[in-house]
Amino acid sequence: MKIWVDADACPNVIKDILFKAAQRTGVEMTLVANQFVRVPANKNITSIQVSSGFDVADDEIVSRCNSGDLVITSDIPLAAEVIEKGCNALSPRGELMDKENVRSRLNIRDFMDTMRASGVNTGGPPALNHTDRQNFANHLDRLLTQFHRS
């Protein structure tokens, strides 16, 4: 398993959790972003800077990930694509997405886009809180433990 991080929108507190987990377990992790991302000096943690543009980082992750990898993203369409390739997708809020729930999330996302396009102010997501960070860390630990057992 390798961890891929959609790093442009990933909160720093989540990156810190990921860095510690990668250092502790030795799992390979790559952060992909449109801008430079500083990573700890560790042989199993790298970053890739892609050119700016719509979905360039997402496309890079999709082209490089393999079945069994873990992708960290809050981007529902990206999650759907990597799940189709056999990857796991985990949001920074600790929501594990799978084939059963990603389609309904896409439908909700599309509905909200339609609402916003028609002038309805839907607001943004709430700020990341302690419970979200804890959920993320717990799901990450479970996935890493499953990987090391197999």
Image: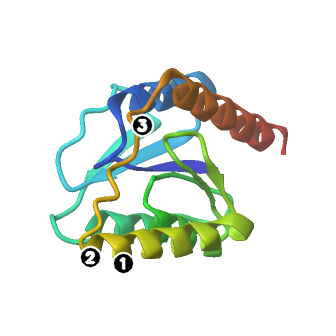
Answer with left or right where residue 34 lies relative to residue 77: left
- Image point (26%, 76%), residue name: 117
Q: Looking at the image, which residue is at 68% across and 59% down?
A: 68
Query: In the rendered structure, which amino acid carries the disc numbered 2?
Result: Ala
On the picture, is 84 further left or further right than 115?
A: right
Task: Give me the disc on residue 114.
Answer: 1
Residue 4, x across and y down, in percent: 47, 51
Could you tell me if the residues under marks 1 and 2 are in contact, i.e. CB atoms within 8 Å?
yes
Residue 74 vertical position relative to residue 58 in the rendered view, above or below:
above
Tag of residue 45: 3
109 relative to 136, above or below: below
Of the two numbered discs 1 and 3 in the rendering, the one whose residue sits closer to the viewer: 1
Which residue is at the front of the view, 133 or 115?
115
Where does residue 112 sit, x and y in percent of width and height?
Answer: 41, 69
| Distance between mark 2 and mark 3 Cα atoms | 39 Å
> Cβ–Cβ below 8 Å for labels 2 and 3?
no
